[in-house]
Image (tube, helix red, strand yellow):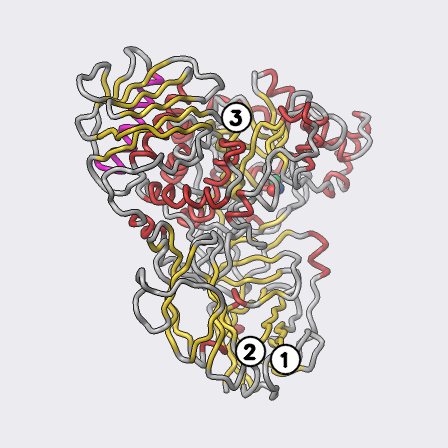
Amino acid sequence: MISFARSLVALGAVLAATPALAQVPGLLPVPAELHAGKGALAVSGKTALVVPDGDAGARNAAERLAALIAESRGLKLGVGSRASGPSIRFVRAATGKPESYRLDVTPRGAVITSGDDAGLLYGAVTLWQAMTQVPGKGAVEVPAFGAVDAPRFGWRGLMLDSARHFQSPAYVRKLIDWMAVNKLNTLHWHLVDDQGWRVEIRKYPKLTEISGWRHPATAPGAPQLPRVGGYYSQGEIRGIVAYAAQRNVTIVPEIEMPGHALAAIRAYPELGTGVPIPPGTESDWGVFPWLYNVDDKTFEFLEDVLDEVITLFPSKYIHVGGDEAVKDQWKGSAEIQARMKTLGIKDETALQAWFMHRIGEHLTKRGRKLIGWDEILEGGQVPPDATITSWRGIEGAITAAKAGHDAVLSPSPTLYFDHRQGAGDSEPPGRLDVMDLKTIYGFDPVPPEIPTAQQHHVLGLQANLWTEHVRTEERAAWMTFPRASAVAEIGWSGKGASDFNGFVDRVIPQMARMHGLGLNAAISAFQVKTDVDYAPGRDDVTVSLANQAGLTMRYTIDGSAISAKSPVYAGPFKAKLPFELKAESVHDGRGVTGAIAQKVTQQSVRWRSDEALKTCTNRVVLALEDDYPASGKRAVFVSDIFNPCWLWEKAPVGGARQVAITVGQIPFNFQVGKDRDGIKFQTPATPEGEFVVYADKCEGPRLAVLPLAPATGNPGLTRLVAPLAPRAGTGTLCITYTAKGVDPLWAIDAVELIS
Ligand code: ACM
C-alpha cells in the first residue's frame, strides 16, 4: 500500500525566520575550508551581480545565481559590469584545481573567484545556499564567511534510466537543476534498453516508431493498461544538453550493446540472431537473451547510430553498455559460430571483447572515449583507453585501476537507487534490500584494495536510478533525493564526508531549499517508524520508535498535537489500548516531516500490512506495483518472486478464530532464463489454487486454507476469509499459496486475525 501525503514541505519551516545566522551556514557539499567572518551582508533587490565585460562564463554563473534566487526568494537581482553599493562580484583568477572557487562574504559585498566557468558557477551555488539557509521570501542577511573549495573527484554522477520508463524533457531539466545545486556534474543517460529506444535517430526512424512505446505487462485475464513511452527528438536533446552545460552538467549518453538490444532488434530484426520475439516481451524485466549479431552491416548500423549520438552530445565519453550479454543466442547461431571461426576467436566472451574493441576504435576515430560496464574487462581485449563503470560491486574498479584503466564506482546494491530507502507503506515500489541514506553516505569510493599508485584511476562515483519499478517522475525524484546529496558530498568533500550527523544537519536544510526548486524528496530517513509489540490477553502494548537519521523524537499518546512540551522518546514504552500515537522527528527544535498519527487498537495489533511481514527467503525481493487500476492508487506488494511466501513473526494468534488475507495478482514478467523452472509451488487442491497458512515454519501444522476462486477473476484486491485452527499466545505464521505455475504471481496486501 502506498500514500504520498507527506513530503518535505514541512522542512520549509524547520528554522525560525531569524534575520541573520550566527554561524557559517550549513552548506552541502561541505566546502573544503570554511571560516566565519564578522557581521552580515544584506542582500536585497538592489544588490547587483557584477561580471567582467565580455566574460560569458562569469555572466552565465551570475545569471544562474539570479535565476536561483528569484525562484527561491522572489528577489530580482540585475547582472551588469558595474555597481555602486554592495554587490556580488564574479572575478576570474586562478584558484587551483578544475571546478575550484573561493567565496568571500563580508558586510561590504561578496566576491566569487575562480579560474574556470565551473568554479564561478559553484561559488554562486554556495552563495545561493547561504542565502536560502533561512527559508522565506524577499531580502536576506547572509552571515559573513569565507570558503576555499575544490572537489575531491571530477566525476560526481547520477545515471537516469529513461529506457524502462520515459521521463519528460521537463523532468530531465529539473533533475539537472537539482544536480547542479549539489555540485553533481555528470548525468549518465541510459537512453536505450530492451524495453525502449528513446533517442531519435534520423537514419533509423523505426527505432523510435516501433520501440518508443509499449503496453505494460498485466496478469493473465487482467484488462490491458494504456501504452506508455515516448522519445527525445534531436531538437529536445540539443536543448537539454545546452541546459545542462550552463549548469556544469555533462551528459554522457549510453547506447547499449551487444545485449539489452531487444528494442533495436524489434525495430530492425535483421540486427538480431534470428530468434523470434514473443509478443509482449518488451514489457518484461530482467536479463534478456536477445543479442545483436556480429555482421558488418550490424556494425554499420551501430556506427551510424553512434555518429548521430556524437553530434548531439559533446561529451568526451560515450557509454556503450556491455553488461549482462548472456551468450546463448551467439552459441546457438551457426552463422555466428562460423564468423568466430573465421576470425579465430575462441569463445563468445572473447567475441564480445572483439565487438567492444571494434566499437572503441570507431569512437577513437571520432575523437571520443569508450566507457562501458565492468563486463568489458572480460575476454582479454579491453579497448586500450576504455573507462569502466564498476557495477558488480567494486571489483571492476579494482581490476580496471590495476590494469591502468580509469573507473567510475557505481556498485550494486549500495549506489543502486532503484533499491528502496526504507520500509513501509509510504515507500514507492522498488527493489530490496533497503539502501538507506546512511548506507549511501558510508560508501568509500577509493577502496583500500586499489594500490595508492593506481588510485588516480578512480574518476569518481555515480548512483544509478534504474526505472523498471519507477513508473512516475514523482517517484523518480523520491528515489533520487536526498540520497543523491550523499553521493554529491562523498564525491566533492573528501575527508569532510565522514560525519553522518553533520551530513544530516546539512541535508535537512538542503532538501528544504530544493523543495523551493520543485523537489519533493524522500522523507524515509527522517520519518518516525513504529513497532508495536502485543501479546494476546493483555490490554497494553510496548511501543518502540526509530528514525534512520538518529534524530530526537517526540510523541504523544493522548491524541494531542505534538509540541515542544511533548515527551522526548527515550526508549520503548508501554501504553494501554486503545490510544492514538503521534510522533515526529525533531531537528533544531522543529518537527522535520510532519507527525505520523496512528490509532492503536485491539484490531490494529492483529493486522499486518505486507510491508511489515518478512519474506520467507531473500532471493529476489521486490516491492511490485499492482497492474490495476489503470489510473488512481494501486497496491504495492512485497514478495520474493522466486519464492512467494511470507512470515508474520510474533503474530497474536491466541483467541483468533478466523484469518483474513487481502490478496492481489500481478504478472510474472521477468526474463530469468532457466531459473523460471526452479520456482516451485505446492499442488493446488482446487482449480484456482489456494492461500495456505502454516504455524511456525512453513512445514508446521496447517492452520487455514483460503481458496483463490473468489479472487481469480478480480484484477484488484480481494479479501479472503477462512477459519483458523485454534492456537494459544503468539507465534510465527507462514503464508504461501498453491499454484500450477508462476503467472500470475499472487501477493499479499494485508493479513488480519479475527477473534
Ligand atoms: C547493470 O546494472 N546491469 C549495469
* Residue 21 falls inside the magenta stretch: no
Q: Position of residue 506 (x, y in %)?
A: 41, 41
Where residue 464 appears, as percent x and y from the top left, is: 54, 41
Q: Amino acid at mark 1?
A: Thr
* Residue 80 image label: none
Q: Is mark 3 within 8 Å of ligand 1?
A: no
Q: CA distance from mark 2 to mark 3?
A: 59 Å
Magenta stretch, main secondary structure class: helix
Magenta-drawn stretch contains 59: yes
Residue lying furthest front: 38
Q: As rendered, which of 147 and 98 lies closer to the eye?
A: 147
Residue at the extreme top: 54
Does residue 386 appear left or right of residue 307 in this picture?
A: right
Determine if residue 672 is in view.
yes
Q: Quadrant of residue 109?
A: top left
In magenta, the rendered stretch is 57-74
Q: How far, Cα to Cα, is label 1 from label 2?
A: 8 Å
**Image side of residue 518 versus residue 41, left or right:** right
Residue at screen point 70% across, 79% down: 700
Give the residue at x 65% y 73%: 738
Residue marked by disc 3: 154
SS assignment at label 1: loop
Q: Which residue is mark 2?
A: 709
Residue type at tag 3: Gly
Q: Foreground: 33 or 88?
A: 33
Pointer 3 local density, CA inside 10 Å: few below 14, some 14–19, many at least 20: some
* Marker disc for residue 686: 1
User: Image point 50% across, 47% down: which residue?
Assistant: 437
Mark 1 or mark 2: name the one nearer the start of the chain.
1
Image quarter (top left, top right, bottom left or bottom right) of the N terminus: bottom left
Asked if disc 1 and disc 2 are in contact, CB closer than 8 Å, the reply is yes
